[in-house]
Amino acid sequence: MPVASLIPLLGLLAAGLGVLTGVPQVLRLLKDPDATGLSYSSAVLGALASGTWLSYGIALLDPAQLLANVPGVVCAVVTVVLAGRRLGVPLRHAVAAVSAWVPVVAVAFVLGGVVVVGMLATSVSLVKMLPQIVTVLRRAPLTGLAPSTFVLTQVSATLWTVYGLTTGQGSVVVCSAVTVVLAGIVLSRRCPPLAVARALHAGRFGVPGQLLVRPFVLARRATLTLAA
């Protein structure tokens, strides 16, 4: 199969994973009223980002963007509504943000076309995680965050980065590459690597988890033996 024919499939795979990224957080908010550590500002900006990328995908008629962002917008809106209720933030703030942003996207498309819309989508996507990063850096409790959301975000963003490189979409490359880094920062704070390794070794995730960390455990034991 020619490499060129695999590029659309790569985009669809990235989009498919992108559809799933927000699901764990929605499920967590539905099951647990504890939203500690979840940034409402990031949730609102995430909805704006999904909407802007959807506009970009419609303008380009890009199937990957449409597949990712039609359900992505729905998931982002649900997250905003649930997070607002859990955190006690009035929904009018989100409505005001959307009302102010829609004309900006429309004017950008009229004046600069799809390229400018892509730039706007990239900008809001880069900014959307900053409030969450600030919360993380403040060492606030993050029990309200769903780790699976950030794992899926990293994997999806990595695929989007490759897709953007192969299709020459600079906006996609910049946005996705930075998202990989920012999601990694949040994930490393929510699930510290050492704590995850200990949980796997203790059998919390079954035999596959134990096998996954076994080489690291053996290497650590060998290092301690040599040091003694």
Image: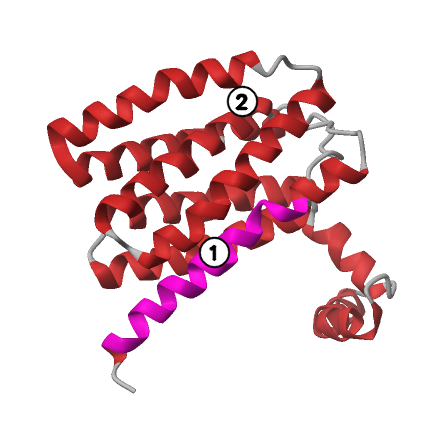
Are discs 1 and 2 less than 8 Å apart at CB?
A: no
Check the image and report above or below for 1 versus 56.
below
Instruction: Give the mark nearest the N terminus, 1 or 2.
Output: 2
Q: Characterize the local packing of mark 2: few (<14), some (14-19) or many (20 or more) Cα atoms within 10 angstroms.
A: some
Q: In front: 14, or 129?
A: 14
Residue type, numbered disc 2: Ser
Where is residue 202 shown, x and y percent of the image?
A: 87, 63
Q: Which residue is found at the position 55% from the left and 25% from the top?
A: 134
Q: Is residue 11 magenta?
A: yes
Please, is residue 102 above or below residue 52 in the view? above
* Disc 1 residue crowd, few under 14, some 14–19, many 20+, Cα 10 Å: many
Q: Position of residue 200 (x, y in %)?
A: 79, 63
At mark 2, the secondary structure is helix
Quadrant that contains the N terminus = bottom left
- Relative to residue 48, is residue 58 drawn left or right? left
Using the numbered discs, state the Cα–Cα distance from disc 1 to disc 2 in whole angstroms: 22 Å
Secondary structure, mark 1, is helix
Q: Residue at x 68, y 52 (%)?
A: 193
Which quadrant holds the C terminus? bottom right
The numbered mark at residue 41 is: 2
Q: Please check the rendered image and state whether residue 182 is part of the magenta-colored stretch, yes or no.
A: no
Q: Residue at x 67, y 47 (%)?
A: 24
Q: Which mark is residue 97?
A: none
Circle 1 residue: 156
